[in-house]
Amino acid sequence: MRRDFAGAAETYDSAAVLAREVGARMAQRLDLVKIAPQRVADIGCATGDGIRDLQQRYGKALPLALDYALPMLRTVRSRTPRLQRLTGRGPRLVNADVRALPLAANTLGLVWSNLMLHWLDDPLPAFKELHRVIEVGGLLCFATLGPDTLKELRVAAQKVGAGDTAKRFLDMHDLGDMLVTAGFGDPVMDMEMVTLTYPTPRAFLADQRHLGVRDALLGHQGWHDWRRLFGAWPQDDEGRLPASFEIVHGHAWKPEPRQVADGRAVMKFHRR
């Protein structure tokens, strides 16, 4: 998937309707949180919509844009205003995998991740790494795809007896349990459905290809199977193909540690 995603840097924005919509909803949720982070990071930044939003929202914070696809980071740099580049106020670009971040522990006040974590077969190592780099009192805010994503495709596959090759995504309760295991405190999880419609099957497949996720999302089907699947795909009243995406939102804070690195428990005494 890394190669497909990297190759999609030039076409990504033309198809990133869902990412932009989810990013806007994530931003609305931040309106309810009163924080003033010194460093903010967009993990899996793609072409940079998220980090630009965070820069506007937290103008005094140091912005970091992280992605494992170098072409995406080059696009972020090309879209950074010249004045920001000259004054050193543009986002710091970091080419890295979320499971092995080249960042010091306890350095980020806010981590944002929009529709990236679901590509990991096991998000727990990523949550542990994010917990390591977030400072005490810092916030992790993310959105990911849930198990009811592309339910129309799965129903169509069942109708025609085709293989269900689309990627399976984790339930929000499983993600919440992983956050607790990673050390985050009292995670808040919720979900919503977002439905996009496409005029033709070709348009749907083209969007996934332009995003660089077609094979990772849909798996491999033969052409004849795709024809059968799209023939059974339910259409809306206007004859368009609906594609539902379950969006799982997660918020979690990093609490004060209950034990230090060598395993000793931390106890606090208050004078009365």
Image (cartoon, grey):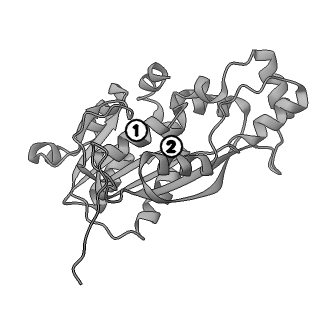
Vertical placement of residue 161 versus 250, above or below = above
Q: Nearer the viewer, residue 46 or 121?
A: 121
10 Å crowding of disc 1: few (<14), some (14-19), many (20+): many
Residue placed under numbered mark 2 in the picture: 115
- The picture places residue 222, in percent across and down from the top left corner, at 75, 15
Q: What element carries label 1?
A: loop
> Do the residues under discs 2 and 1 have CB atoms within 8 angstroms?
yes
Mark 1: which amino acid? Gly
Give the residue displayed 40% in from the left and 37% down from the top: 46
- The picture places residue 187, in percent across and down from the top left corner, at 49, 58
Q: Which of 169 and 192 is in front in this view?
A: 169
Residue placed farthest to the bottom in the image?
Answer: 272
- The picture places residue 20, in percent across and down from the top left corner, at 48, 49
Mark 2: which amino acid? Leu
Q: In this view, does 124 lie to the left or right of 73?
A: right
Q: Is residue 174 left or right of residue 227?
A: left
Residue placed under numbered mark 1 in the picture: 44
Q: Which of 209 and 259 is in front in this view?
A: 259
Give the residue displayed 47% in from the left and 34% down from the top: 12
Q: Is residue 50 left or right of residue 220?
A: left
Q: In this view, does 272 lie to the left or right of 153?
A: left
Spatial separation of the CA atoms under disc 2 and disc 1? 8 Å
Vertical placement of residue 97 versus 235, above or below = above
Q: Is residue 4 visible from the viewing direction of this image?
A: yes
Q: In this figure, what is the number of numbered marks?
A: 2
Give the residue displayed 83% in from the left and 37% down from the top: 155
Q: Nearer the viewer, residue 11 or 217?
A: 217
- The picture places residue 69, in percent across and down from the top left corner, at 37, 27
